[in-house]
Image (cartoon, helix red, strand yellow):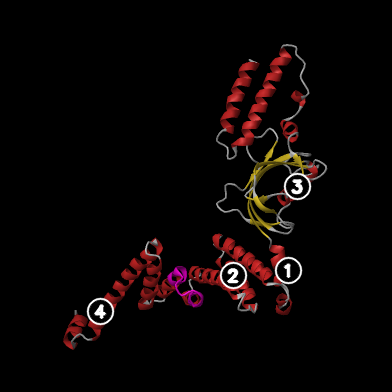
Amino acid sequence: MTSSFLNTSTRKFKARVVPDFRGRFRQGLWRQLCGKMSVFSRLRNGIPPSRDDCQSPYERLSQRMLDISGDRGVLKDIIREGTGDTVTPDASVLVKYSGYLEHMDKPFDSNCFRKTPRLMKLGEDITLWGMELGLLSMRKGELARFLFKPAYAYGTLGCPPLIPPNATVLFEIELIDFLDSAESDKFCALSAEQQEQFPLQKVLKVAATEREFGNYLFRQNRFCDAKVRYKRALLLLHRRLATCEEQHLVEPAVLLVLLNLSFVYLKLDRPAMALRYGEQALLIDKRNAKALFRCGQACLLLTEYERARDFLVRAQKEQPCNHDINNELKKLSSHYRDYVDREREMCHRMFAPCGSRSSVGGN
């Protein structure tokens, strides 16, 4: 009876494990659970359990993990290596995470099912001290597994009813990207005279960070916030009085921000401003296909069909196989055809003979 109960529970447990979002850890727990079942059979045969048999799954897992807190309160196991520098303090991070309690195959907390994870700032938005320490040890693109002891997680009281008291929790964390916002915030708080004292590379780095923030906000459909970041980046670049030798470094950065501003103003349904920034981009690179395309879109929205056609044909000349440009030209053709039909009908009504107009009115 006991054996059949264990076998039935085993099948149910395994069925739950397989379709879960992260399979690696649950499959490991499954193997460890099977090991525990063999312990029961050994006890029935009178064989004493070994030291490993008395350990919990998290205790076994912790033996091959790296101590990053110094007191084994935060343990780490790298699943996939990242690249570049480690996360800086006060950075804003873009992460996917799932948190698990021991002997549970489903996460008690996860953001992996969201389409776009939220950008979180270290020291403000992250409540678990263990997670903050773990993130500071990670690199862009890294996927790692962490064990947090109660002092680095939910403490002695836990978080009822979800987290029991004195619970050790496991988190799988993927660092998608991070932005060093602290450096940018401090630099932007300086006066124009103080910013002038810094080398050009510093200004370019801060402006790039502001633009990356804008791109993230744009992907979140927060267009007004993205516009503020883009304008902040443009102001930093325009404040810098670049020499002739430095101009070739500043202009590409300015061009990217102008293109971003033109696009975000189209999203905000302000085509006149989109056209303004698109034309500024063309002053830097008159053959830039994106700038020509943005100007064409803006003119189409402004019903300036001749100008729209001019911009779009020039964009098509630069990128003949670009589907967006070709589709916009088709859209322009349709709009222009409707416009001509309306103009023709209006002229016909204006210059129609008086008799026909009166008869039309009589009818």
N-terminal-most mark, 3 or 1: 3
N-terminal-most mark, 4 or 2: 2
Q: Amino acid at mark 4?
A: Arg
Q: Are marks 3 and 1 in contact (CB under 8 Å)?
A: no
The part of the chain drawn in magenta is: 278-293
Q: Are marks 3 and 2 in contact (CB under 8 Å)?
A: no
Spatial CA distance of label 1 from label 4 is: 60 Å
Q: Is residue 288 shown in magenta?
A: yes
Q: Which residue is mark 3?
A: 130
Q: Are marks 1 and 4 in contact (CB under 8 Å)?
A: no
Q: Are marks 3 and 4 in contact (CB under 8 Å)?
A: no
Q: Amino acid at mark 1?
A: Lys
Q: Which residue is mark 4?
A: 344
Q: Which residue is mark 2?
A: 230
Spatial CA distance of label 3 from label 2 is: 34 Å
- Name the mark nearer the viewer: 3 or 1: 1
- Name the mark nearer the viewer: 4 or 2: 2
Tag shown at residue 186: 1
Q: Residue furthest right?
A: 71
Which residue lies at the image location 46% right of the left edge and 68% below the top edge?
A: 290
Q: Which corner quadrant holds the C terminus?
A: bottom left
Badge 3, how many Cα within 10 Å: few under 14, some, many 20+?
many
